[in-house]
Image (cartoon, grey):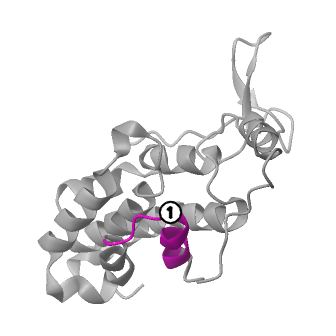
Amino acid sequence: MSIPPQDPEILCQEAYLHGLKYLGSLYQNLRESGLGPVMRLRIITWFTFLPSPLVELFRKRRERALVILAHYAVFLKLTAGVWWLVGVGNRSLRDICKHLGPAWHFALDVPLRAISIEDTTELARLVLGDPFWDSRRSPVGTQDADQERETKQLGLVDDEGRPIRLSEDAGTVVLAEPSEPGEEPVWHIDK
């Protein structure tokens, strides 16, 4: 919202807002559900939800887009135990912050501070701005059952986040809980 009206990037405002909305969903899930397998899955699949105009802004290395990407890279550090993402968060943070330089440090406080933090609880506290936050995991002995229950809640959704299912009789994907008869899933097919 701080993009001045005369700035050519005002045309990108909608893409930035959508990216921030999806980034905000990571913050919300972390605060509400902690550092479980669903959180890791949400972090890993974050890019799949982004509108293609925002991905294009990443490719063009637009400063505001890279600030969003830097904040996402902090979440990559929370994927401890995912072997193929080890070090990706820190490397991305260092590269993005270096590319943007001191002129953008005002928008990179958390990403810059996250570079030196390895403990996931401390990192989550930094991300959420809550020094007392603790992952809301169950006591030892029930954690496996909680993770299994959390994972079973996963399902497919349309581009609006509404649950979908495969209709065997129709041979297609339909809304699991349509609000009116004949309502169909929404797919945003970008050109």
Residue 31 sits above or below residue 182 on the image: below
Within 10 angstroms of label 1, few (less than 14), some, or many (20 or more) residues? some
Residue 178, can we see it? yes
Residue at 64% from the left image edge and 60% from the top image edge: 29
Q: Position of residue 92 (x, y in %)?
A: 25, 59
Q: Would residue 132 be found to the left or right of residue 113 on screen?
A: right
Q: Quadrant for the C terminus, please.
A: top left
The amino acid sitting under disc 1 is Thr
Residue 191, can we see it? no
Who is closer to the viewer here, 111 or 16? 111
Q: Quadrant for the N terminus, please.
A: bottom left
Q: Which residues are magenta?
A: 116-127
Residue carrying label 1: 120
Quarter occupied by residue 68 = bottom left
Quarter occupied by residue 10 = bottom left
Who is closer to the viewer here, 155 or 175? 155
Q: Position of residue 22 (x, y in %)?
A: 52, 60
Q: Position of residue 179 (x, y in %)?
A: 85, 45
Residue at 67% from the left image edge and 70% from the top image edge: 134
Q: Secondary structure at mark 1?
A: helix
Residue 45 sits above or below residue 90 on the image: above
Q: Position of residue 9 (x, y in %)?
A: 26, 75
Residue at 55% from the left image edge and 67% from the top image edge: 121
Report the predominant secondary structure element of the magenta stretch. Answer: helix
Q: Is residue 29 magenta?
A: no
Q: Would residue 59 be found to the left or right of residue 178 on screen?
A: left
Number of residue marks: 1
Q: Is residue 117 magenta?
A: yes
